[in-house]
Amino acid sequence: MGYELRRWLEDRLPQEISSGERVVALAIADLAWDDSRIAYGRKFMQKLLWKTGFENEAQVGKVLGKLAARGIELRVPICGADGKPLRNKRGQLVYAHRGHQRTFRIPFESEFPGRPAPYWDDQGEQSPDRDPHAWFDGERSPGRGTFEAERSPAREGFKGERSPGREGYRAERSPARESMVTQAGDPIPLTTPTFPPTVTPRGTDSAGKAGSEKDDPALTAAVDFLMNLPAPWCLGRVSAKGMAPLLLEAIAEQGWQLDADLVAKLTENPNGVHRPMSVLRIRISDLPKAPQRTASKPGSNLPPWCGHCGDGNPAAEFNAKFRLEAGSKKPCPDCHPAHRTANAA
């Protein structure tokens, strides 16, 4: 069911998560479908409790909350009739309620801060002093001696003879390789495995992905924005590339721009934040609507207030004497009437 998906997630989970968080995440991946990455069912929570060893759903819920705080969200929020996720009175997403079963989803690699997956080249781990074909025709291999001298009763007749359970062994073929010996018993080299049409080699896929990122200026701008946030909010190259699509989606829906206002919103209230990366991901996912630029009242001769000068004093909207550059007494070049008049002249 989710065996391959579990192995995929096991290689990419961050090293710093607790054992309980790892057990819950891998158990959900094991119960999910490999193709859709979705997990649900009438007895799903019973299976999850059995696999993880937790006593009740409340304990599992606390672990899922800790995973979400690390940026690994496995829960799927419930959507209303309008197709938008439901929220409670405190503005938090709702993942379950009476009469609605829980649904889980294993995120893609770009959707959570995971480790780069290792590449285990098991096929290449052959000893340099060992002939991989020697044992097929009874030749001596280093450290083993000959089969003639160490033949056990259970393997009697192995060399050159057919046993009941290995009928026709020398002519068998493995799914990914040619036969290892010819009809005459001589070893032949292994053939290089070929990729089926639906499978893309690792190098081709990564090169294509890198090319698409360079061709998308919006994605490049989002990556640069995240990498240039003030410390400790700035991200590294890999983390910024993983979080950039989420940022682009959020600002497109909520009306923000990649400017100083968004920087101030994402990095506000830094006191007490111990995991800036996880907090930043949550703030991007839960980004509110962008504030509307304040316009001047009807009948006023003042130009619209830019909203930045006057140290944020709201009186600057109605009185030009407050429209001064921050830290100085110079008129604001963006919205002070003196500059507007000079420009018009």
Image: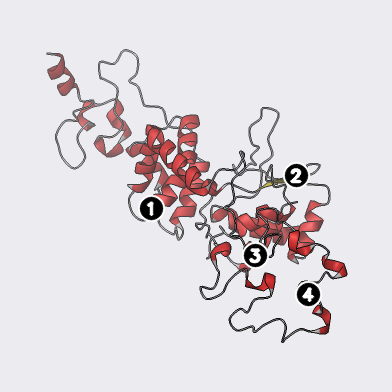
Relative vertical location of residue 143 with respect to residue 115 in this rendering, above or below: below
Amino acid on which the number 4 mark rests in the picture: Phe
Amino acid on which the number 2 mark rests in the picture: His
Relative vertical location of residue 265 with respect to residue 20 in this rendering, above or below: above
Tag 1 or tag 3, which sits nearer the N-term? 3
| Residue depicted at 79% across the width and 84% down the height | 152
Residue 214, picture quadrant: top left
Tag 4 or tag 2, which sits nearer the N-term? 2
Q: Return the residue nearer the eye: 264 or 158.
A: 158
C-alpha separation, residue under disc 2 versus residue under disc 4: 64 Å
| Mark 1 vs mark 2: in front | 1
Q: Mark 1 sits on what residue?
A: 236
Mark 4 Cα-neighbour bin, 10 Å: few <14, some 14–19, many ≥20: some
Mark 1 Cα-neighbour bin, 10 Å: few <14, some 14–19, many ≥20: few
Residue ranking furthest to the front: 184
Q: Mark 3 sits on what residue?
A: 186
Place of residue 223 in the rendered image (x, y in percent of width and height, measured from the top left): 38, 42
C-alpha separation, residue under disc 1 versus residue under disc 2: 38 Å
Q: Return the residue nearer the eye: 208 or 96.
A: 208
Q: Mark 2 sits on what residue?
A: 97
| Mark 2 vs mark 4: in front | 4
In this picture, residue 162 sits left or right of residue 235: right
Mark 3 Cα-neighbour bin, 10 Å: few <14, some 14–19, many ≥20: few
Q: Mark 4 sits on what residue?
A: 158
